Amino acid sequence: MATTPGFARLMLEFGQWGLDHRGWVRTTREGYVTTLHCCAAHIRGEKARRLVRASTRDLEGFLFSLVVGPRTRNKHRQALIAFFDFATDQGYRLDNPALKLPRLPEPRLLPKALEPEDCTLLLKEAQAIGGETWAATSGLFYSGMRNGEIRPLGWHMIERHHIRVIGKGRGGGKEREIPLHPVFKQALDAIRGNDPRWVFPSPPGPRHTDGPMSRSKFVNLLKEVGDAVGIDIYPHLCRHSFATRVLDESDNIRVVQELLGHASLSSTEIYTLIRNRKKDNAVFTLDYGRELGDAG
């Protein structure tokens, strides 16, 4: 096995590995490194064992020492899995002990979706910026594609009226067709000459590759739009907003399932809960006069 560097150097290598191989954004890298610092301190305090040599029991002891909810604990678990993926990839150890850590059941949260007026505001700002920013924003809002589906789009996948998408979720590997909305088509036409192969190519610079744009670069396109209008925006938020609008317009959950590329209808049905919540809110916010609330 390779010689393990000191902890500080190890964290630098881990962060760079995540950027190069997983496309992590800055907040993901920082969160994972924070988890590893806490875990290393716990293991040194308990058993004086280096993190890279930790056993599943060591890691489990750390996770269950945290006074946090299941969702946060699962995020820490994911950080440990990522670290030992890195360690095995670099030859610092032969196995990944974090894969045996139990994943705790989490309460199902409703996906967040933007209101139509917020979508319009973001799209207008993206259109004003133009270029790849306009194509990325309109593509997400008008197709519902995942980040991992829209970033590697090749021009050969763009047809006259449809986009051929290779799924990246649980139904990954399956091809589906998404209608090519005229607004997205207009944005694509404006950048068609930028690269012969990729719709969103890797930008020039020291980290340039012959492949598509990295995850972090793509997210930064959206961040520029969101910062300009004061709305947080990320790819999956656009996907949720798309699904909610399509369900409102079509009233057909199967249509939404096919467009999103969900392998199971149960994954799509959560959007009906969003609509039910909107109905509840519409009723609960009715007010015919405050004095009526005191009526027995």
Image: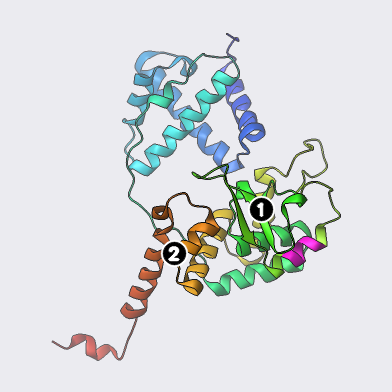
Where residue 42 sits in the image (x, y, percent)? 39, 23
**Region rendered in magenta:** 185-189
User: In the image, which disc is placed on residue 253?
Assistant: 2
Q: Is residue 272 left or right of residue 213?
A: left
Tell me the quarter of the picture where residue 179 sits. bottom right
Residue displayed at 47% across by 68% down? 247
Where residue 67 sits in the image (x, y, percent)? 31, 38
Residue 187 magenta = yes
Amino acid residing under circle 1:
Arg
**Is 285 drawn above or below residue 210 in the view shown?**
below
Q: Quadrant of the N terminus?
A: top right
Where residue 209 sits in the image (x, y, percent)? 78, 36
**Relative depth, front residue between 269 and 138:** 269
Tell me the quarter of the picture where residue 104 sits. top left
Q: Secondary structure at mark 2?
A: helix
Tell me the quarter of the picture where residue 182 sits. bottom right
Q: Residue furthest left?
A: 296
Crowding near the residue tagged with mark 1, few <14, some 14–19, many ≥20 C-alpha atoms within 10 Å: some
Q: Secondary structure at mark 1?
A: strand
Asked whether the viewer can see residue 7, the reply is no
**Is 5 drawn above or below residue 160 in the view shown?**
above
Q: Quadrant of the C terminus?
A: bottom left
Residue displayed at 76% across by 67% down? 186
Q: Is residue 159 left or right of residue 292?
A: right
Residue displayed at 46% across by 62% down? 254
